[in-house]
Image (cartoon, helix red, strand yellow):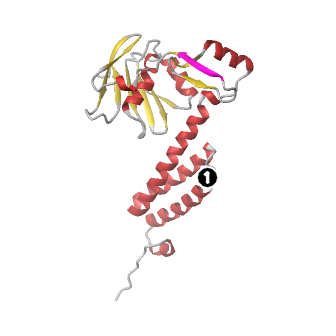
Amino acid sequence: MKAACVCAALALVACQGPKTKECFRLVQAASVASHDVDAKRIESVEAGLKAVEAAEQACTEAGRDEEVKQLAKGRVDLAAHLERLKRKATDPARQPLSAEELAELVAKGDPHCPKGQGYKHSASGNEIRCNGPQVVEMNYAAARDYFDRRGYKLSDVEPAQLKAELGAESLVLAYQKPKDTQPPRCIIIYPPPDQSWQEAAARATGTRPDLLKVGGSITTTGGRLPIRLDVDSGAGPVRIGDCES
């Protein structure tokens, strides 16, 4: 009778095939990396996330469903925490300012954030109002500056399209031509899981969330723009403007 090789734990890793061995090896590495994560440092959380993602991919290839399930949960938690850290690091309210810079912001407002918004500068306690354009009204250069200041990853996915990503959130701004000096003809917003489509659209347009309706429209300085979703239930990406051409 042939002896069966039952491999259900890391202690029996020698009985496993190469893919399972790699899965277990990376799970152990991810466990160590996650334990050593400094939750206050972006670089440390990124390293922990990278280790978990590598282990998840290896275990998926090995068909280790239980390990994949646990790793996926860890990945989601680390990614969410990383997104919060990045937003905190790029929050204009936390940026160090000279006395002259602060006085100018208090007097004139911040032209780098959309009109109608505002924030309290944490170091001084001063209230700063925003007086810049809404995202839906930003030309290519203004949009790049706005998202870059907030730590978004930027890429030109097509000659006339700018993509901005931060954690689970992403936006695609489509212009009529490369580096257009006019507002985008279309904005497609992919909200993070914890954000409603109304909140996502409100952040980009300055319109109150309770006034936004599926199939409705919003008013901008360039006229009215339609709002569409992929499904009537309110799920999926938000499309604002002429997104059909």
Question: Which quadrant holds the C terminus?
Answer: top left
Question: Relative to the observer, which residue lies in front, 180 or 192?
Answer: 192
Q: Name which quarter of the figure residue 104 lies in.
A: top right
- Residue at 48% of width from left, 18% of height from top? 140
Question: Relative to the observer, which residue lies in front, 163 or 149?
Answer: 149
From the viewer's perspective, is residue 100 above or below residue 236?
Answer: above
The span shown in magenta is 126-131
Which SS type dominates the magenta stretch?
strand
In this picture, residue 200 sits left or right of residue 47: left
From the viewer's perspective, is residue 139 above or below residue 54?
Answer: above
Find residue 40 and report its horizontal and vertical position in percent: 63, 45
- Residue at 41% of width from left, 16% of height from top? 177
The secondary element bearing badge 1 is classed as loop
Which residue is situated farthest in the bottom direction here? 1
- Residue at 45% of width from left, 59% of height from top? 70
| Residue 233 in magenta stretch | no
